[in-house]
Image (cartoon, rainbow, N blue to C red):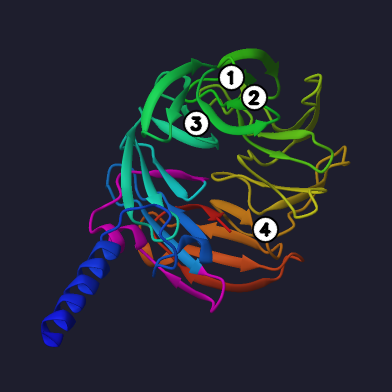
Amino acid sequence: MKKLLYAALLLGAAMQFTACESDKSPAKPKQRYDLTQGMLIANEGSWGYNNASISLYYTNGDSLTNDVYNKVNKEVLGDVLQSIAISDTTAYLVVNSSNKIVAVSKYSCKKYGTIVVSGPRYMVADNQTGYVTAWTNNEVAVLDLATNKVTGSIAVGKGPEGIILNNGKLFVANSGGYDKDNTVSVIDIKTKTVVKTIQVADCPKTFVADKNGNIWVVCAGYTDYKNPANSTNGALCKINPSNYEVSKVTLTGVNPDKLQADLSKENLYYSGSYSGAGIYKMSISGTSEPKTPFINGSFYSFNINPHNGEIVAMIVDWKVEANNKMVRYSNTGSKIKEYTVGVGPNGGYFFN
């Protein structure tokens, strides 16, 4: 009788263990590929090759693992991983050319949902509602994150790119896409309507907020390849979110599309993906562009580590996979170490 009881207890424990192991809850903690343990790197891959991937850099132990999504889910991620967003316990992998957003647990990278969105670019979340910029129809798609469904859309300018949530309003950078635009759409999230259209410089790309509550948008400027005389310079534009007033610092010699703020939110860093070498630094009180880069080099993107202020830069090589690198720099601009990542690293994300 005791043997039968013991066997039953063992069977029950095994069944409980199996149930736990197959649990698809996004909140399951302490997994091997816990994305909160460091920096998640979005490797967009080569367009049309379906080779997007993610790399995970573990800050504790200074190690890096590539192709994490495939290792966990035993499937390819898709074509062009444009960006990553976080909401509560979920990481949303925005896969542009595959027209989808993949929802994974931030504690394990286990996939548990897919949202179909045409041409998604960047995403922010407000509780259980997501907002995604989408080029295909020049809109912001509205998502129900509880059901992983698109529930509506909001028309904005051409080529909506970066998006930021500030005091109940969304600021959307209308980059022009394959055309030209120089506006920022302001959306009231209560009414889901555009309440203001702000004119900035040509081709606004992405935002940061500074310590004074102002919103900065980096503008790449417009490049007219057929008639170069029509090309325009890039700029950093400061937006007062209370009255929508805009001030501008013109940037020459670089077409910037990446923007970050340091930990104090007193300094801005910007760079360009395709033209202009280096990462530049400018104070939020600055009135003229810096003359020389803060860090020299040809970078596709970069990020600021929110824990220690390190600058993490991305180097791309579309032909030789081993030449795609993530490089750590100190907050004084000195190189620390570089690591091999997937093809086309375009950004790093910290979820803890």
Q: Residue at x 45, y 53 (%)?
A: 42
Residue 320: image x %, image y %?
A: 36, 62
Q: Which residue is mark 4?
A: 306
Residue 84: image x %, image y %?
A: 48, 46
Q: Earlier in the sequence, mark 3 or mark 1?
A: 3
Please determine whether, in this image, residue 234 is positioned above or below residue 51: above
Q: Is residue 33 magenta?
A: no
- Residue type, label 3: Thr
Q: Which mark is residue 129?
A: 3
Region in magenta:
58-87
Q: Earlier in the sequence, mark 4 or mark 3?
A: 3
Could you tell whether 344 is left or right of 190 in the image? left
Q: Earlier in the sequence, mark 1 or mark 2?
A: 1
- Mark 1: which secondary structure? loop
Query: Are circles 3 and 1 on residues that touch, CB within 8 Å?
Result: no
Q: Which residue is mark 1?
A: 181
Of 42 and 101, the residue lying toward us: 101
- Residue type, label 2: Asp
Of 36 and 235, the residue lying toward us: 36
Of 113 and 2, the residue lying toward us: 2
Residue 250: image x %, image y %?
A: 77, 33
